[in-house]
Amino acid sequence: MSALVTMPLGVTAGPAGASTAPAAQAAGGQQSKILKVGVTQEIDSLNPFISITRTGTDILRTAFDYLTVYSQQDQKPVKSLAESWETSEDKLTWTFHMREGVKWSDGQPLTAKDPAFTFNKMMTDEVARTANGSFVSQFESVEATDDKTLVIKTKVPQATMLALDIPLVPEHIWSKMSDIGAEPEYPMVGSGPYTITEFKEAQFVKMKANKNYWRGAPKVDELHFIYYRNADAAVTALQSGQVDLVNRLSPTQFDALKNDSDIALNNAQNRRFNEILLNPGAATADDKPIGNGNPALKDVKLRQAIATAIDSKTLVDKVWGGYAEEAKGYIPPVFSDYAWSPPDDLKREFDLDEANRMLDEAGYKKGAGGVRTDKQGKPLNLRLLTHAENVVDENAAPYVVGWLKDIGINAQLQPRSDDQVNEDTTRGEFDLAMSGWNANPDPDYVLSLQTCANRPNAQGEGGTPDSFLCDEEYDDLYSQQLQEFDPAKRADLVKQMQERLYEQATLVVFGYDNALEAYRKEAFEGFPLQPADGGVIMNQQGYWGYLGATPKGAGPVPTFDENGMMTASGEGTDEAAADSGSNTGMILGIVGGIVVVLLVGGLLFARGRRKTAEDRE
């Protein structure tokens, strides 16, 4: 196996087959250009119908294209496999005209039949709806009237039709799969700027650059994502030159790297919110109770008191070192059109005395040792699921435990592996759990996570829940926003939904941490950020950073115009723009023809989706 990297000193386990050999030789004897990325998250699945985690979707976005994508410049929808479209006057029929001449990586033509197959499979197969089912829940029919024309009819007007975040799969491959939820075979047939060629469980995923990609060929040959158990190991690998790029740095690591002349840093406003889940009584989509959550948490007054005892400012200052924004609404402030802040008459200020008063009033009396009892006289003991070796969880959880103790609730930390947290939260086997999501520019997806319909079946498939909220008022507002095409009116509905979610307190937002990224300056010229002004390199809502990654000496760094086409303007990140604390200087190194994801000490499930609190997309 070529072009693998060894583990840094102090890391207990390395990728099987890792080598200290030089970079792989490309055809003709030239050395391949390789980007080595250190990640600290396990992949849930590489099945595009199943995967919902950051790393899994980051990889799949580069392997499978979409009807439309969010632009690199400002994250507005732009053309992709759909070259143009029109809608009927009643907005119930959408006609998409597919880009001609595009081929799958195996040489077969990509036609309208492929998205028709993808969407119809999701409409008829519960498992295929696991990751992105909310997007097709109101589809009436989907038909390819010819190779270039896709016609989608919806039951109600749907405002998200130009923001369908669904990777399109090839019908001639996936129609032959007897189990749509199984892990795919490799190499995978795709249509994106890279093709997944190999996966080794707990080691790596390799992707090869698509030199015939219709937007233009990547400048790189191989990309390796290497999994490390924790951020300390990943940073050690970065400093030793064993990886070129890392993200999800802790504030301490980020500040320490400011003194390293070989490293450039990127501090960008993120699209992520962090939260703690409060299990209100987990149930399946057909309302059958599941899990073993503490039934006391069904009481909204108890949940609201807990929310009052969470201090976002302390978490921003102490856990994120100021590299974050204090909690407001469910939608992160980076998406200003939809972001909501509670008005003064609704806002919960951190107040332990008030939280105690609320619990007294609600009838939760203090018992032995100052621990309150529930309505049945049992001590209020709550389990708090956290991710083992996750810096945020490790640092934030003790504060939460302390605050809850101050209001008479005994919280018991339960650090678990990503696997176990995923399984427990999916089955509803938790009381409290650390969690978080990356939101999309269109808020529909993360809003859908709190709907009754997005709860799973008894096997944990067919839907992706977050807090297991099921609320009629919230669901009614969700339906309204989905059908509202007036931007201002839709934004108002989205804010009403956030107010309802705030009141129900099935989750409490901790804050919105910045994307802290670092790369080796001698390896890469730069990467297109998304958005172009102060955006991120990794975990973009698209593939721009990977597609436009520019190795050292191969500049200028491209940008992508309003149609998503590559331009050699040199306005992306570059070494000159890179600054040890700025949000303008980051580089993602991807090289020549192969993207590889190395997983060290992790486990990729053969089939399920492993969504954990901290790890979800």
Image (spheres, rainbow, N blue to C red):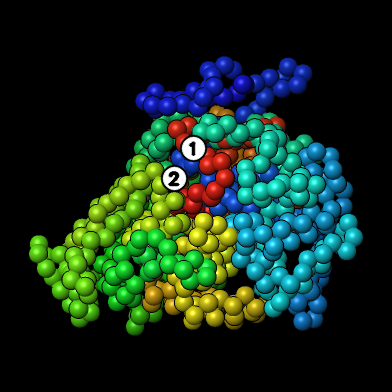
In x, y percent, where is residue 208? Answer: 69, 34
Q: Would you say 544 lies left or right of 116 here?
A: left
Q: Which amino acid does label 2 sit on?
A: Asp
Label 1 or label 2, whichever comes before in sequence order: 2
Residue drawn where x is 64% and y is 53% of the image: 49
Q: Would you say 20 lies left or right of 256 here?
A: right
Marks 1 and 2, Cα distance to the nearest angstrom? Answer: 8 Å
* Residue 25 seen in this snapshot: yes
The image shows residue 5, relative to residue 86, as above or below, that is above
The image shows residue 32, relative to residue 401, as above or below, that is above
Residue drawn where x is 53% and y is 22% of the image: 18
Task: List the residue tagged with mark 2.
Answer: 419
- The quadrant of the rendering that contains the N terminus is top right
Residue drawn where x is 82% and y is 64% of the image: 143
Label 1: which secondary element: loop
Label 2: which secondary element: helix
Q: Would you say 347 lies left or right of 408 here?
A: right
Towards the viewer: 150 or 298: 298
Task: List the residue tagged with mark 1.
Answer: 603
